[in-house]
Amino acid sequence: MSGSPRPRAVRLRPRSVAALVLVGAVGVAAFGWPFLAPPAAAVNAHTQDAPWLFAGLLVLLVAVVAATIAESDLGPKAVAMLGVLAATGAALRPIGAGTAGIEPMFFLMLLSGRVLGPGFGFTLGSVTMFASALLTGGVGPWLPFQMLSMGWFTMGAGLLPGPVRLRGRAELVLLAGYGFVAALAYGTLMNMAGWPFLGTGAASISFDPDAALPANLARFVAYCLATSLGWDLGRAVCTVLLTLLLGPAVLRALRRATRRAAFETAVTFEGPDA
């Protein structure tokens, strides 16, 4: 029923919230340091080293956040749900191999975050991206950035308004709109992570550590337009279409599964009768 409480696979405790805020702050620095650091900053002298350093730091922080959330209230039922959805998402990612942005994994992450909430969503997004990288051989310095970005993407779906009462067409429109914007934002974040690696090979669009903020912003926009806009738009449109076409059935299935799982009911084991 629309008025029933929202099933919670994970209740965010103060420690979990603090860990999410910490990784969020470090993530902003990891993605945005080319725009945040002034031209005279020491970090600009290590343009090729900084992404590697941030990648190493992010993978540790994402692991800490996932462990903190798991410690807070990730019971055996939620772990089982996490495993099933992460495996499904990892299997969906190779479909289309990203051709023209066809990445159905985003659609599943969007609906899962909506139904299961932000804490579970962040863990699911980061774990699914890690599992898919192992499955496809896509392990590299970009992986921690992908894990954090997907964690944010899925967590954001869990923070959308009306998780209990909003249903039907209005909910689908909300999810489709968020999916479109967030899929584009994911691509932009990954561009920010890879842009400093470009070096000076493409002088007109590469990051210039000696340039002012407006000049580097213009270079970054040109980089996005030249390298990934078509891909990112394809991902966003694919997410919207799958949400509108398959969303009602998948949402019902996820909600039915969460009700039957009864995450907030403790698992008990009874011994054999005497």
Image: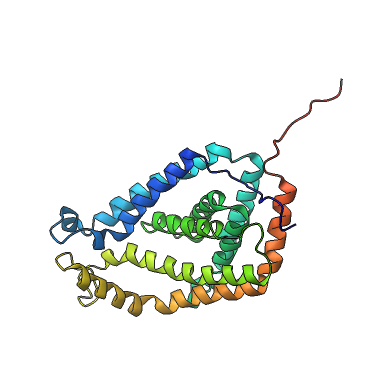
In the drawing, does residue 160 fall left or right of residue 248? left
Q: Residue at x 50, y 73 (%)?
A: 235
Name the quarter where the C terminus is drawn: top right
Residue placed farthest to the right in the image? 274
Q: Is residue 215 visible?
A: yes
Find residue 110 and report its horizontal and vertical position in percent: 57, 63
Quarter where residue 176 is shown = bottom right
Residue placed farthest to the top in the image? 274
Quarter where residue 168 is shown = bottom right
Find residue 146 and report its horizontal and vertical position in percent: 43, 59
Q: Is residue 135 visible?
A: no
Q: Is residue 121 above or below residue 262?
A: below
Find residue 142 and report its horizontal and vertical position in percent: 38, 59
In the drawing, does residue 246 fall left or right of residue 117? right
Q: Residue at x 71, y 58 (%)?
A: 2
Q: 171 or 108: nearer the eye? A: 171
In the drawing, does residue 10 fall left or right of residue 142? right
Find residue 236 and report its horizontal and vertical position in percent: 50, 73
Indicate how the structure is coloured in the image. Answer: rainbow
Name the quarter where the N terminus is drawn: bottom right
Q: 178 or 272: nearer the eye? A: 178
Q: Is residue 221 above or below residue 34?
A: below
Q: Is residue 263 above or below residue 267?
A: below
